[in-house]
Amino acid sequence: MTNAVVPMKRRPVPPSPRANRFFGTANRLRRDPLGCLQAFVDEAGPASKYRFFARMWGYLFVHPDHYQYILQDNYKNFAKLPHPTFLLLDPLVGKGLLSNDGESWLKQRRLAQPAFHRGQIREMGQIMTAAAERRFARWEQSARAGKVVAFDREMMEMTLEIAGRALFSVDLTGEARELGDAFGRLNELFVKLVVSPTSLYTMRVPFWPSTRRVTRDVGGLDRLIYSMINQRRRSGTPGNDLMGMLLSARDEETGEGMDEKQLRDEVITLLIAGHETTTLLLTWFFYCLGRYPAFEAQVQDEVDRTLNGRMPTFEDIPKLVYTRQALDETMRLYPPAYALSRWGNEADVIGGFATSANAVITLCPFITHRLPELWNRPLAFDPERFSPANRSGRHRFAYIPFGAGPRQCIGEGFALTESVLVAAAIAQRFRLRIPDGYAAQLDPQITLHPKGGMPLQFELR
């Protein structure tokens, strides 16, 4: 696949999958987003032009060469705004790092980056393991009683606590359930709105049911976020965490700090991003280990040899090689960010195919991570894929659980550190057993959830 200079009029457009004469593919996407995207690939290949609704068109690309061009080589042509997804998410995340663009985004990124440097993350390691250890007694009781627990909820409450303490020096333990429920409701609602052709219009109607639901849940989150900001301001000291960096930031030209709305957008964006990925990664990780006892035994053996009964520390991470490989393999099969969205500003050529200006561009790492031409036995769980020997020679855009290019997730190091430390701490003490007859199903919300939650049973080792 190349992007050699050829007159645009000679460029073919990507092939199109089947579509309803009037509704396009909207109904297919609404019923089964991931299944529909996979069907596009099956019907049209790794590049397709699909009709969403009536005369609304979009493009799907799933080859690593496509990703390299869109996310890195010509990334300035592929923005977040005015993509409909990010317009819909505006009530929740506003102009935070997730959705902002251009010079404003770059300033925000540079401002927040120091909070995610290696030294800062090292200091957060003890916060991460302590949050898991605080739950051990309750999990041991569950194990002795033989209870099945909502494991995804356990992980969500734990990772929210970690994000609150590590990034903002705030104890969110009491609010974790309420926060998690609000995030969950919004997550589920927004994915329905994204695949609705009329949602950008109905969201402008204050009394519309979905608008009222968003207003209610975002309002509750706002009260908490503004309380966090005001409490820090009243303390008189910015602090050395992410909140402190945001409060201390000054515009290079005017010397002014962030206004309350911009602060709110950054805090809520990073609070969501700071827990969502890790929640889902740990949830799917222990489900995979429960399905494959041989791989579970290898993780436990490495953890036991490395830790010898103590809690893991940041310095142990380089020794927990197989644990990290198993986490990477989990993200290959179940990437939390299963699809990425961009807005093509100008007409372009991607992998030899012409795309029009002002176009919706969709990328799907979930599909790419399972392409048979890139991965041997793609549906099998095998951590050895990520051994140093097996990594070499692989296209660097074949595996992008945190995105890629200049907009690669700022919290990747934070999420991976937390995941390795918490996974090792739990695996040293417990096994997670899958209830008889249970098989997880995919629930592609804004991120990739297990449908109906993840019921697992703690078992003492």
Image (spheres, rainbow, N blue to C red):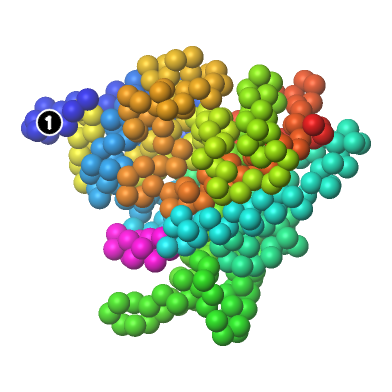
Could you tell me residue 392's position as x and y percent?
A: 35, 26
Q: Name the element at disc 1.
A: loop
Compared with residue 24, is residue 239 higher up or lower down, i.e. above or below?
Answer: below
* Kind of residue at badge 1: Ala
Residue located at (43% from left, 49% from top)? 409
- Are there few (<14), some (14-19), or many (20+) residues within 10 Å of tag 1? few
User: What secondary structure prevails in the magenta region?
Assistant: helix
Q: Which residue is mark 1?
A: 4
Q: Position of residue 309 (x, y in %)?
A: 73, 40
Q: Is residue 234 above or below residue 40?
A: below
- In the image, 382 versus 205, the foreground residue is 382
Q: Is residue 268 above or below residue 397?
A: below
| Residue at image point 63% right, 25% down | 298
Indicate the position of residue 153 as horizontal and vertical percent values.
Answer: 72, 45
Q: Is residue 90 left or right of residue 223?
A: left
Quarter occupied by residue 423 = top right
State which quadrant residue 256 falls in.
bottom left
Q: Quadrant of residue 96?
A: bottom left
Q: Position of residue 147 (x, y in %)?
A: 86, 35
As for residue 163 lying within the magenta part, the answer is no
In magenta stretch: residue 109 = yes
Q: Nearer the viewer, residue 136 or 24?
A: 136
Q: Quadrant of the N terminus?
A: top left
Q: Which residues are magenta?
A: 102-113
Is residue 335 visible from the viewing direction of this image? yes
Vertical comparison of 150 with 390: above or below: below
Q: Does residue 201 appear in this view?
A: no
